[in-house]
Image (spheres, rainbow, N blue to C red):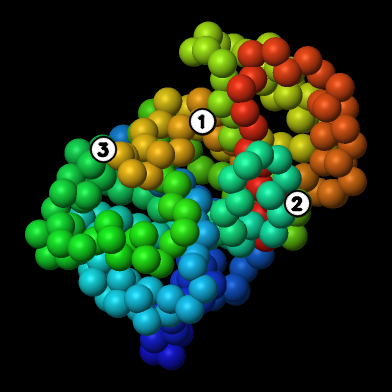
Amino acid sequence: MKGLRHILLTVTTYLIIHSSFGQSKIDTITLKKGEVFDILLLSQHPDRDAELKSYFQSAFPIAKKMSYQPLPGFKIINNNQGNLHPNILVLGKWDNTTIREAFLTEILKDVPDFHERRRKIWSYFGLRYFKIESDLSFQINRNHYNVATAYWLESDKRPNPYYKKWEQEIETAGGKILIQLKDGTSPFGYQYNPEYFVITSWKREADFRAFQEKMKKQDLNGVKHINEFILQ
């Protein structure tokens, strides 16, 4: 299959396959209770196609055997806030936490230089995964303006006043929270540790920009850091 061969050449084609070969502008993501949802933020070094091909050939069969299922991926077209500048957001899922955590150990039996390979391919590799507490399903319409936002708080005290205000204002401003994640885990060497990771969707970019301007006037007390990415 021609498309399958192309998956090994670049992350871009990998993301196209995650998006059902571009056949649909709407991606439906379904997660069951107990499954583990991966959030990967990546920046690729230039001229690493050969290493990327070898990585996928070596690692993907093992990950899939251990229940990994790729989900839609997205190019990041703008880093709206924050000091991290990944250019790709990749989603995936595993059957349960035990398997997800075992993978990073099991993969070394067959691919001893697994982590070194990742470092050669990607200049940034942030990973956070979340155990799903109840069944959920959501859709991402690629014709809409989709935004991923991550919050680091100054303490574990919840709810944070600014974040709660942000959450409440989204619907009023014309946006929709597609998924809201907290209490995730980042393995050693892949730290990405926000208290909240949220994907929102807006029918119009103008509505998001107006919302953003309004939130800039709010007191950021209790918020340590924000990362925000515009998805394509």
For the point 14% across and 53% down, the residue is 106
Between the residue at mark 1 and the residue at mark 2, the CA separation in whole angstroms equals 22 Å
Name the residue beneath numbered marker 3: 97
For the point 64% across and 32% down, the residue is 226
Name the residue beneath numbered marker 1: 194
Name the residue beneath numbered marker 2: 145
- The label shown at residue 157 is none
Sequence-earlier tag: 1 or 2: 2
Q: Secondary structure at mark 3?
A: helix
Q: Are marks 1 and 2 in contact (CB under 8 Å)?
A: no
Tell me the kind of residue under disc 3: Thr
- Of tags 1 and 2, the one toward the viewer is 1
In which image quadrant can residue 191 be found? top left
- Of tags 1 and 3, the one toward the viewer is 1
Between the residue at mark 1 and the residue at mark 3, the CA separation in whole angstroms equals 19 Å
| Residue 186 screen position, x and y as percent | 37, 37
Between the residue at mark 3 and the residue at mark 2, the CA separation in whole angstroms equals 32 Å
Sequence-earlier tag: 3 or 2: 3
Q: Secondary structure at mark 2?
A: strand
| Residue 91 screen position, x and y as percent | 46, 53
Tell me the kind of residue under disc 1: Pro
Where 79 falls versus 55 (above or below)?
Answer: above
Q: Nearer the viewer, residue 198 or 51?
A: 51
For the point 75% across and 54% down, the residue is 144
Q: Secondary structure at mark 1?
A: loop
